[in-house]
Image: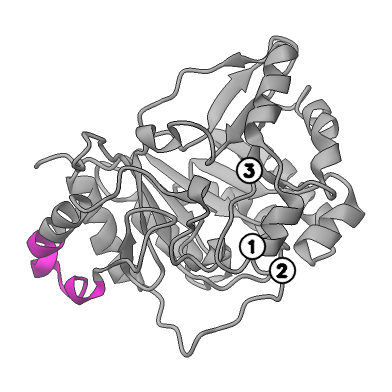
Amino acid sequence: MTQLEDGFGRQFYYLRLSITDVCNFRCTYCLPDGYRPNGRNYFITQAEVARITRAFAALGTQKVRITGGEPTMRKDFTELLRTVADTPGITKVALTTNGYRLAKHAQEWRDAGLTHLNVSVDSLDPKMFHQITGENLFHEVMAGVDAALDAGFEQVKLNSVLLKGLNGKELDQFLDWIKTRPVEMRFIELMQTGEMDQFFERHHMSGEQIKQRMLQQGWQSVLREKDAGPAERFWHPDYAGKLGLIMPYSKDFCAGCNRLRVSAQGKLHLCLFGEGGVELRDLLAADEQQGELIARLQSALQTKRETHYLHQGDAGSTPHLASIGG
């Protein structure tokens, strides 16, 4: 089977699979007014998840990240997780979560096949955490992080969107936190989306400036794996944890793109900031359609743009990051 490759020679080993766009948090940079359903949503089913994952695996995908919204809000989340993990060819199963159910279910999800975990923790100060997320759940989320470390995941990461005037001053506090903990702390540069123009102008911090500061403090680059996400990763001899920076405005950010997205509505998105999406759901009803599904994936990939145009102020049609799984 031909590897998924676009017209610029980039190969794709990594699928970000959204299973819901519902979220129970109200993060200022994503859903400040909370989740607002747009009509009645019919999110992809367990059978559809299985067919999507098999098709991508047949085309060389090795890593699947389950995203949302908040994916663990689905009642059948553990079954969906096991479906993905049991797919031949898939070697890494990751989850991005706000962590509100993690303390109770970390071991259950690890046993179901989850290997890598990203937990959104936008502040280590409970009051600031509440201000950014809209939920007073800091201690519950951090208990979940501890439970995840005890459960033995291959990798645990904390995600933080750094915001000028809010949690931006906590950079040193985050670094102190990973000095003795084997966790990767990832700082995500705020991205402009359709509903967030004024928020972006007010709170954006340059990822490149943070990178230069880290290099001056002795952090050193880590070699990027072929199925890794977009973060530039760093290590320091004095720290048990690692550091990751996701900088979508940096030069050549898209040159190493290796990931595709499928939304909870069953659409293929070639870029987080692309337009519209490619319908897949009409080919997810039966196993006999697998060949057509694979052909559509291969064909659609030839229309992928060389780069996003965020640096020109063009965020495409993406209204907010929860809409197609971030």
Along the viewing direction, whichever of 148 and 120 lies nearer the viewer: 120
Front: mark 3 or 2? 3
Give the mark nearest the N terminus, 3 or 2: 2
Q: Is residue 12 visible?
A: yes
Secondary structure of the residue carrying tag 2 is: loop
Percent of width and height locating residue 295:
10, 57
Amino acid residing under circle 3: Glu
Find out whether the residues at labels 1 and 3 contact each other: C-beta distance under 8 Å: no
Give the mark nearest the N terminus, 1 or 3: 3
Return the mark for residue 26: 2
- Residue at image position (40%, 25%) is 225
Q: Which residues are magenta?
A: 281-293
Q: Looking at the picture, does residue 146 appear above or below residue 288?
A: above
Marks 1 and 2 sit apart, C-alpha to C-alpha, by 17 Å
Along the viewing direction, whichever of 247 and 138 lies nearer the viewer: 247
Residue to which mark 3 is pinned: 189
- Residue at image position (76%, 55%) is 202
- Is 283 inside the magenta-drawn segment? yes
Amino acid residing under circle 1: Asp
Q: Residues within 10 Å of mark 2 (few under 14, many from 20)?
A: some
Farthest residue to the right: give it: 127
Residue to which mark 1 is pinned: 197
- Residue at image position (10%, 68%) is 289
